[in-house]
């Protein structure tokens, strides 16, 4: 296995586990909507590009599939089922016996794998295993996976860029938790980190995927035509950060804690992502298009807020400790209700990209 020297710096946090009112399980209908909206594209991609006769690698049978950033369910079950149905069909239509399937469910170490496996669909036609660890490093043996899938996860970066937490740096992000309305150096540091991470992601997957294997990614991005992503993107996070600053003013958290907290999230444009994919010699971009559903994000801001909380609570608690999340989200809810257009505009401005990459044969 490759030595990944930056492993100690990797951010490791998880969505809210269990099945309580704040859990990811109860608050992930938007991400489910993305998987449903991508279903036809995914299945068509398999029909057009997954050829059982051309797969190479040490063990294409059983067919190994991995969902990267699967969380604690239930959305991953649906994504995996769509993929297996389409691959089975490929075998049948080539007159080949349907193979056995092995599915690997990957997420960060603190992910609630118990809830994930405890709620598995009763009827499933695959063997399942959990693979904890960051998808920015190696997760699987060489040429062992035929199909990678990842949905709503590749906007997370592996670590907060160091310079934005350093007081002496031009990129010090004092009093903010993200890059909206921050000095351009902050945005630049995030953008560099994202590029490095995506390159590492592609490098690792290229080794793990069999020749002619496929990778389907659904990635939240911002439109190419946004002139200043530094101003546009992350208005919602700017509002959340302002609540933490308010809490510091009344002594509920320390200013130092707020200054050292930054969200490991970055929204690229499709154009920049395409450049990163094109620079990689191991993959062919077979498809890259926006998922065309105007209704991915709910009108009701309270639903949005619950989704944010389910996604961010673990991260916030790992930095500030338990006990501030209720207060923080009460304050955030008040601000969002006062100016709901900020959140709606930000969310409705996100473009979810569907990307299909094909691994070139390994000896090509
Ligand atoms: C918004 S959830 C999406 C979950 C699921 N794919 C879905 O569509 O519902 C993002 C998931 O990606 C995981 N994640 C983020 N960064 C990761 C990394 N570097 N390695 C593995 N998982 C990661 C998070 O822990 C989280 O469970």
Image (tube, grey):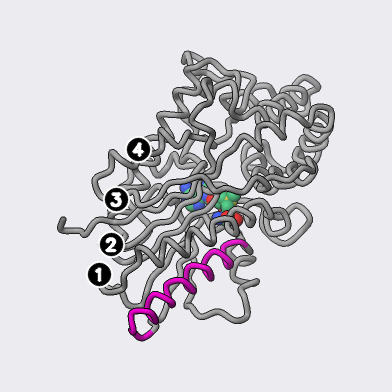
Is there any visible trace of residue 108 in the rendered image?
A: no
Indicate the position of residue 266 as horizontal and vertical percent values. 52, 35
Q: Locate residue 75: give its quadrant.
A: bottom right
Q: Mark 1 and 4 residues: CB-CB less than 8 Å, in contact?
A: no
**Disc with the residue nearer the chain's start (2 vs 4):** 2
Depth order, front residue of 288/183? 288
Residue 343, numbered label: none
Residue 283, numbered label: 3
Indicate the position of residue 268 as horizontal and vertical percent values. 48, 34
Q: Which residue is mark 2?
A: 212
The residue lying at 32 percent from left, 56 percent from top is 358
Residue 321 appears left or right of 150:
right
Q: Which residue is mark 4?
A: 276
Q: Mark 2 and 1 residues: CB-CB less than 8 Å, in contact?
A: yes
**C-alpha separation, residue under disc 1 versus residue under disc 4:** 26 Å
Depth order, front residue of 361/118? 361
**C-alpha separation, residue under disc 3 versus residue under disc 2:** 9 Å
Report crowding for label 3: few under 14, some 14 to 19, many 20 or more residues within 10 A (C-alpha): many
**Disc with the residue nearer the chain's start (2 vs 1):** 1
Report crowding for label 4: few under 14, some 14 to 19, many 20 or more residues within 10 A (C-alpha): some
Indicate the position of residue 60 as horizontal and vertical percent values. 30, 73
The residue lying at 66 percent from left, 39 percent from top is 316
């Amino acid at each position: 296995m490759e030595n990944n020297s930056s492993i100690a710096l990797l951010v490791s946090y998880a969505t809210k586990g269990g099945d309580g009112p704040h859990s990811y399980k109860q608050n992930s209908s938007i991400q489910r909507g993305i998987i449903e909206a991508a279903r036809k594209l995914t299945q068509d991609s398999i029909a057009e590009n997954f050829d059982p006769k051309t797969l190479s690698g040490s063990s294409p049978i059983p067919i190994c599939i991995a969902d990267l950033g699967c969380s604690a369910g239930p959305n991953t079950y649906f994504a995996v089922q769509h993929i297996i149905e389409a691959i089975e069909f490929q075998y049948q239509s080539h007159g080949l016996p349907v193979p056995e399937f092995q599915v690997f469910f990957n997420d960060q170490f603190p992910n609630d794998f118990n809830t994930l496996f405890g709620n598995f669909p009763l009827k499933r036609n695959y063997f399942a295993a959990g693979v904890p660890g960051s998808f920015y490093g190696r997760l699987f043996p060489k040429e062992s996976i035929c199909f990678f899938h990842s949905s709503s996860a590749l906007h997370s970066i592996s670590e907060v860029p160091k310079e934005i937490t350093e007081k002496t740096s031009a990129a010090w992000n004092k009093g903010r938790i993200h890059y909206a309305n921050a000095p351009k150096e902050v945005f630049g540091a995030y953008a560099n980190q994202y590029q490095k991470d995506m390159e590492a992601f592609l490098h690792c997957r290229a080794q793990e995927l069999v020749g002619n294997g496929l990778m389907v990614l659904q990635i939240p991005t911002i439109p190419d035509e946004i002139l200043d992503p530094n101003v546009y993107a992350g208005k919602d996070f700017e509002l959340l950060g302002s609540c933490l600053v308010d809490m510091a003013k009344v002594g509920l958290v320390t200013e130092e804690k707020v200054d050292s907290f930054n969200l490991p999230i970055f929204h690229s444009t499709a154009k920049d992502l395409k450049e990163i994919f094109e620079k990689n010699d191991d993959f062919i971009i077979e498809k890259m298009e926006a998922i065309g559903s105007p209704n991915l994000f709910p009108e009701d801001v309270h639903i949005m807020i619950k989704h944010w909380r389910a996604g961010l609570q673990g991260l916030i608690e790992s930095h500030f400790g338990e006990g501030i999340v209720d207060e923080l989200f009460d304050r955030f809810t008040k601000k969002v209700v006062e100016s709901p257009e900020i959140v709606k505009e930000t969310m409705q401005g996100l473009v979810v990209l569907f990307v299909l990459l094909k691994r070139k044969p390994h000896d090509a």
